[in-house]
Image: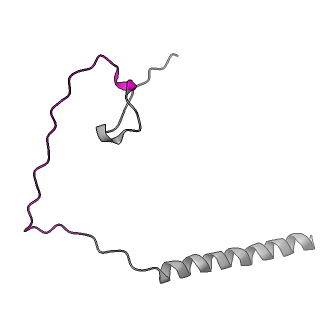
Amino acid sequence: MDRLIWTAWRAFWVGLGASAVLIAQTLLAPPPAASTVPDPRVEEPAPRVEEPAAKSAAPILSRNPFDSSRGKLVARVRSTS
């Protein structure tokens, strides 16, 4: 029982020390960079419009699901019950 109490007491101080380290890192960290607000005097170029590609006979699920250049890949799954 004494060993259990000693272990709990030790864990308390380790946790308290870890909390102190996290708080100190938060306080000593440099402030976040100021948000960049676009200058209203600078005109941005118009977005480039891509021509739609020819329709493919391949199903939509044949695309790479991790390719973020085409947007999210969403598939509907029917239940078999």
Q: Which residue: 39% across, 25% down?
A: 61
Q: Which residue: 49% across, 83% down?
A: 28
**41 part of magenta stretch:** yes
Q: In the figure, residue 34 lies in which quadrant?
A: bottom left
Where 25 sits versus 4, above or below? below
Q: Is residue 6 left or right of residue 16?
A: right
User: What color scheme is it?
Assistant: one colour
Residue 30 picture location, percent across and down: 42, 80
In front here: 49 or 21?
49
Quarter of the image for the N terminus: give it: bottom right
Q: In this view, does 12 lie to the left or right of 59?
A: right
Where 61 sits versus 25, above or below? above
Identify the main secondary structure in magenta.
loop
Where 35 sits versus 72, above or below? below
In front here: 1 or 61?
61
Q: Is residue 43 left or right of residue 69?
A: left
Q: Give the range drawn in magenta.
A: 36-62
The count of marks equals: 0
Residue 6 picture location, percent across and down: 85, 75
Q: Which residue: 48% across, 82% down?
A: 27
Q: In the figure, residue 41 lies in which quadrant?
A: bottom left
Residue 72 picture location, percent across and down: 34, 38
Q: Is residue 9 left or right of residue 27?
A: right
**67 part of magenta stretch:** no
Q: Which residue: 73% across, 75% down?
A: 12
